[in-house]
Image: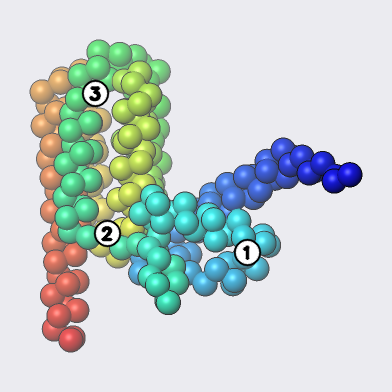
Amino acid sequence: MAKAPKKANPKNGNRRGLAIEEAYQKVKKMIYLNQFAPGQKIVSNDLAKRLDISITPVIQALNRLEASNFVTYVPNKGYFVSEITEEDARQLYKAREALELYILPTVIANMTAKNFDEIKEAFSLQRSEAKNLVGRRLILLDAQFHLKIASFSGNDIICHMLQEIFEKLYLRYRPEYLGSNRIKEVAEEHRNLLEALRQRDVDKALAAIRHHISQGMDRVVSSLQAEQHTDLTLD
């Protein structure tokens, strides 16, 4: 009599899922911290040893990161940290602008003294970090400042969409694009937005966001164009 096939143990599937999620989050964090720079090759075997995780969940995590456009797989060459393109940057900044402008009146309508203090704290944290001119850290604090403002809109779906936009921008963004002059400009632009929120001035806040996002997009696009020109010159 043939033996009945063994039933799959759901605990094994759960463990695999947790290992993939762990690898995914760890690699993502490494990109955040610039331990993997845009354009850099990721050697899966070395990564598995570095994370002390077996190779299978690492490969599956890299495939998941590829689906999110955080890494790129090149046949016969392997995985590379994705680099942002000029068109990507323009589309992401335009999407970000549309969402932030949409929720800003609601943020101001919902504004309380406690909410404003939390936004001010996020601003102070970024301003403090700006003295050290740490590019990647500063970029992440910029995102946190804007996400803190968005959180008071009460629209969780838009907040999630904005978080994804920031990730797609900043995980593929070279920290060197953020020069010392731009760091000072960002601080001033955030200060203007903070003042508009304090005054509950919707028009002033909308103008501040438009200007800030436009300046950010112009900076990234011009950096990408300059880099492309340099590459063509070298060729």
Mark earlier in primary sequence (1, 3) = 1
How far is mark 1 from mark 3, CA to CA? 43 Å
Residue 87 in picture, x, y percent from top left = 17, 55
Q: Name the image quarter holding residue 229.
A: bottom left
* Side of 31 relative to 44 (left or right): left
Label 1, residues with CA under 10 Å away: few <14, some 14-19, many ≥20: some
Which residue corresponds to the image point at 24% horizontal and 17% vertical from the top-left? Answer: 106
State the residue position of label 3. Answer: 103
Which residue corresponds to the image point at 33% horizontal and 34% vertical from the top-left? Answer: 161
Q: Name the image quarter holding residue 121.
A: top left
Q: Which of marks 1 and 3 is in front?
A: 1
Q: Which amino acid does label 1 sit on?
A: Ile
How far is mark 2 from mark 1, CA to CA? 27 Å
Label 3, residues with CA under 10 Å away: few <14, some 14-19, many ≥20: some
* Side of 89 relative to 112 (left or right): left
How far is mark 3 from mark 2, CA to CA? 26 Å
Say what secondary structure mark 3 lies in: helix
Which residue corresponds to the image point at 35% horizontal and 41% vertical from the top-left? Answer: 164
Disc 3 vs disc 2: Cβ atoms closer than 8 Å?
no
Q: In which quarter of the image is the C terminus?
A: bottom left
- Which residue is nearer to you in this view: 25 or 118? 25
Q: What residue type is labelled 3?
A: Ile
Q: In this view, does 25 lie above or below 157?
A: below
Say what secondary structure mark 1 lies in: helix
Any part of residue 138 in sight = no
Say what secondary structure mark 2 lies in: loop
State the residue position of label 1. Answer: 55
Q: Is residue 159 above or below residue 11?
A: above
State the residue position of label 2. Answer: 84
Q: Which of marks 2 and 1 is in front?
A: 1
